[in-house]
Image (tube, coloured by chain):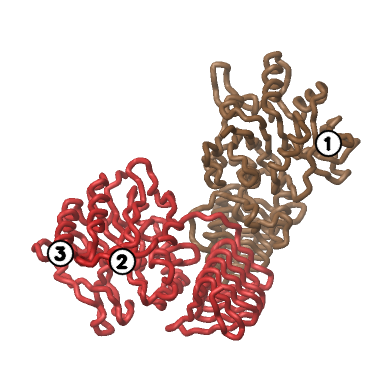
């Protein structure tokens, strides 16, 4: 297929309620489901739509993201023919340093340059907080069929599926032959039990419309975001067409929703919905040995990546690469990230161990489903319950 | 920078003693140890030894092998103008250039080696499971000012009749070569690893070819010719795990040995990694009904049954009530429900239907071939 999309990934996302997991990484770099990072999902959608390039706007240094993305070859973004991953980091620092306006002029220029230099006809704007597996080709067909000015993506969910004080919005729709957007409103004020159309902050629009909106945003010193552009469209009395997504969705907004998303994958229907469909999810290949399960290992409903050594008991848990679990240890309802080491006779329940955590013999940690304990990267956990940065 | 060394991996063999497993793929492409194919060991040795110009000579059923090797990027070989290059027989004005033997395969690819213009050529076999630092052997070759260095390893005396045996003097110079001898004078077996000074080897291959003398095989022709002409040939002793997985039984037992976490190969050693082409696949999913014990399992597997002392490659599905014991399951195999598999090798992409049984013994391992279907409905009459 010919490349038709110029993707812009806005990775300046809400990290506050995900700490300490986001202390040193953006939402897009959060590890997920044993061997992925959240960025793999939008990138795989791009791969499956045969996009050849992407522009990334990152709040901080982007170090962990660059380490994962490398040349972009995993997602076909390293082609000589128009390919490339165009990264723009420190967006937050640059805007904080700018005293006269919210954004410096390069913020707008960088968007402009990327879009005008791409040969694609359309711009697609997306982020990484809405964990899903979107078929961009279908969105594109919908957009062309409806002759849309802009198309936004939503999913119908129950109020309870988003966190109580969520920062995200719902779309108010005119239900006609095509769903069009009347307006957007915050979800946080809605009563529990409400069904709502969550705005997935993903938009498809022509290059021409994008550039037009870009100038308007620059004039008014506004964000280049899906919500700004919905407002611009409504203000011009044009219609915002809404595309309904019906696949797996989890909005990653706080530690609990992150925890739940991982636990969701232990349910086969969710797992299949996200991973076993025509369009595969791709992640950076890493060299690894198979996982070894010892003679006394007991495993019930759990997922593992390669390169682990397991001698203990693991139930309802998600285990990343290169984790060792010694005998006598019991891991339940937990997420253990890459390179962590669990010595003998350890008990973990409702715990998230970030990367490279060392748990000493006999230690015991128990969180609750609503409030899992998070152990920061490189910590050492002692039986006395003391943890410190290693 | 000048290319000092070109490695040539001979990967054209059929491995006919592997029967059904190599009916449609070459032996070096046969999966091994869950995550690997046999050739990964030679390719990783090249990468770890700093040899990144690697010619992979293929001939028999090369599709899977060629796809696997690609440009060598999985082994990090595609840097600094190097990489893996697949060398297949081709036709020319001189006729078709199918390879008649190990040395003939090098003769037919003189152009590739000359393009790199190296001082040394390392000849390797793509059939063996081992970790070896070829650079140390090259240093030895230079120190001895050898024209040819042969990698050897001591084998039990009673097995010498299966190997090419090197008889050496006290300085490790090879003075006699016996191919599969009844009465061996030495127990140093050739590993099929040779380091040649390239200009000299080329001269032998070209001159003899032009005189219509047979120079097709290293063991039968080249080494005896070198010996007759008093070339300096040295033996380089290798001590470590080395296994030729040429038969069903040896392939099975090598996999079973590989399961041992204390195995000499130390597959988790970060300093000498064994690389492979890693498939893009999902995590391993072990359901509530799964039981695994003393086993290796690879990404993409879905396990609802019981796995004992077995090696499972990527994307293997094992249904509820099925029991897999002492077996090797290759990639993309589907095992239905209530299946019993014991002392067996299940070939890549095979499908074992519900209630089927595949039970072997240590001396007669049960085998399902590449994409073979076992069980299912019996033929209606």
- Name the residue beneath numbered marker 3: A220
Q: Residues within 10 Å of mark 1 (few under 14, many from 20)?
A: many
Chain B: what color? brown
Residue A2 seen in this snapshot: yes
Q: Colour of chain A?
A: red
Residue at screen point 55% across, 35% down:
B85
Frontmost of labels 1 and 2 is 1
Based on the displayed image, in which of its 4 quarters is residue A358 positioned? bottom right
Mark 1, residue position: B165
* Left or right for A227, reference B101: left
Between discs 2 and 3, the one toward the N terminus: 3
Residue B369 bears which disc, if any? none
Looking at the image, how many numbered discs can be counted on the residues? 3
Q: CA–CA distance between discs 2 and 3?
A: 35 Å
Q: Are marks 3 and 1 on the same chain?
A: no
Q: Are marks 1 and 2 in contact (CB under 8 Å)?
A: no
Q: Chain of mark 3?
A: A
Which image quarter is the C terminus of chain A in? bottom right
Q: Please identify the quadrant where the N terminus of chain A is shown.
A: top left
Image quarter for residue B110?
top right
Q: Is residue B140 above or below residue B268?
A: above
Mark identifier at residue A246? 2
Could you classify mark 3 by the number of other residues whose Cα lies within 10 Å: few (under 14), some (14-19), or many (20 or more)?
A: few
Q: Position of residue A339 (x, y in %)?
A: 56, 66
Residue B100 at least partly seen: no
Residue A131 appears left or right of A380: left
From the viewer's perspective, is residue B243 above or below residue B258?
above
- Please tell me whether mark 1 sits on a helix, a strand or a loop: strand
- The single residue placed furthest to the left in the displayed view is A237
Question: Would you say the residues marked 3 and 1 are in contact, meaning their CB atoms lie under 8 Å apart?
Answer: no
Name the chain letter of the residue that bears numbered label 1: B
């Amino acid at each position: 297929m010919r490349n038709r999309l110029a993707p812009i990934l806005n990775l300046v996302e809400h990290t506050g309620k995900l700490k300490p997991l986001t202390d040193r990484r953006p939402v897009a770099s959060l590890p997920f489901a044993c061997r992925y990072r959240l960025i793999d999902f939008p990138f795989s959608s791009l791969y499956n739509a045969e996009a050849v390039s992407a522009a990334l706007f990152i709040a901080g240094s982007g170090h962990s993201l660059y380490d994962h993305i490398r040349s972009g070859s995993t997602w076909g973004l390293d082609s000589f023919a128009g390919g490339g991953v165009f990264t723009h980091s420190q967006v937050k620092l640059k805007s904080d340093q700018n005293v006269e306006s919210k954004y410096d002029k390069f913020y707008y220029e960088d968007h402009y340059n990327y879009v005008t230099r791409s040969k694609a006809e359309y711009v697609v704007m997306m982020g990484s907080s809405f964990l899903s597996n979107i078929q961009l080709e279908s969105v594109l067909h919908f957009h062309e069929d409806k002759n849309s000015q802009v198309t936004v993506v939503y999913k119908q969910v129950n109020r309870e599926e988003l966190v109580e004080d969520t920062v995200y919005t719902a779309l108010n729709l005119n239900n006609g032959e095509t769903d069009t957007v009347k307006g957007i409103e915050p979800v946080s004020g809605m009563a529990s039990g409400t069904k709502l159309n969550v705005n997935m902050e993903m938009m498809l629009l022509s290059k021409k419309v994008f550039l037009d909106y870009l100038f308007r945003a620059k004039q008014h010193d506004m964000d280049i975001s899906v919500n700004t552009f919905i407002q611009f469209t409504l203000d011009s009395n044009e219609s915002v067409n809404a595309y309904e997504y019906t696949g797996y969705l989890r909005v990653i907004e706080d530690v609990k929703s992150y925890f739940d998303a991982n636990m969701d994958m232990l349910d086969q229907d969710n797992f299949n919905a996200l991973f076993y469909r025509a369009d595969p999810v791709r992640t950076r290949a890493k060299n690894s040995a198979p996982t070894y399960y010892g003679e006394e290992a007991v495993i019930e409903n759990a997922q593992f990546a390669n390169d682990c050594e397991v001698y203990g008991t693991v139930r309802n848990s998600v285990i990343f690469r290169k984790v060792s679990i010694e005998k006598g240890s019991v891991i339940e309802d937990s997420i253990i990230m890459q390179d962590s080491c669990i010595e003998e006779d350890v008990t973990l329940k409702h715990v998230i161990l970030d990367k490279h955590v060392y748990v000493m013999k006999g230690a015991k940690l128990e969180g609750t489903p609503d409030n899992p304990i998070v152990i920061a990267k490189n910590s050492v956990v002692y039986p006395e319950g003391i943890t410190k940065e290693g | 920078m000048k290319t000092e060394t070109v490695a040539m991996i001979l990967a054209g063999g059929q491995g006919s003693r592997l029967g059904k497993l190599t009916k449609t793929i070459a032996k070096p492409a046969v999966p091994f140890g869950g995550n690997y194919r046999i050739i990964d060991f030679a390719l990783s040795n090249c990468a770890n030894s700093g040899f990144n110009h690697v010619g992979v000579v293929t001939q028999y059923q090369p599709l899977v092998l060629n796809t696997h090797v690609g440009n060598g990027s999985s082994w990090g070989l595609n840097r600094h103008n190097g990489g893996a290059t697949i060398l297949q027989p081709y036709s020319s004005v001189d006729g078709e250039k199918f390879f008649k033997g190990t040395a003939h395969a090098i003769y037919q690819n003189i152009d590739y080696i000359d393009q790199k213009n190296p001082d040394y050529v390392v000849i390797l076999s793509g059939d063996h499971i081992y970790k070896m630092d070829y650079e140390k052997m090259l240093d030895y070759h230079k120190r001895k000012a050898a024209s040819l260095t042969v990698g050897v390893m001591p084998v039990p005396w009673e097995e010498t009749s299966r190997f090419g045996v090197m008889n050496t003097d006290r300085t490790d110079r090879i003075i006699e070569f016996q191919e599969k001898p009844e009465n061996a004078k030495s127990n140093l077996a050739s590993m099929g690893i040779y380091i040649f000074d390239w200009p000299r080897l080329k001269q032998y291959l070209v001159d003899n070819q032009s005189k219509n003398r047979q120079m097709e095989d290293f063991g039968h022709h080249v080494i005896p010719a070198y010996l007759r002409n008093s070339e300096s040939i040295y033996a380089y002793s290798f001590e470590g795990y080395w296994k030729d997985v040429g038969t069903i039984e040896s392939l099975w037992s090598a996999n079973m040995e590989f399961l041992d976490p204390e195995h000499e190969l130390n597959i988790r050693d970060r300093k000498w990694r064994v690389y492979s082409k890693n498939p893009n696949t999902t995590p391993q999913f072990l359901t509530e009904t799964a039981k695994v014990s003393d086993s290796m399992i690879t990404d993409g597997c879905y396990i609802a049954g019981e796995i004992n002392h077995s090696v499972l490659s990527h994307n293997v599905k094992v249904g509820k009530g099925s029991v897999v014991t002492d077996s090797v399951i290759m990639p993309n195999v589907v095992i239905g429900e209530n299946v019993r598999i014991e002392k067996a090798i299940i070939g890549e992409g095979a499908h074992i239907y519900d209630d089927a049984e595949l039970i072997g013994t240590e001396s007669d391992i049960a085998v399902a071939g590449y994409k073979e279907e076992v069980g299912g409905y019996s033929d209606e009459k």
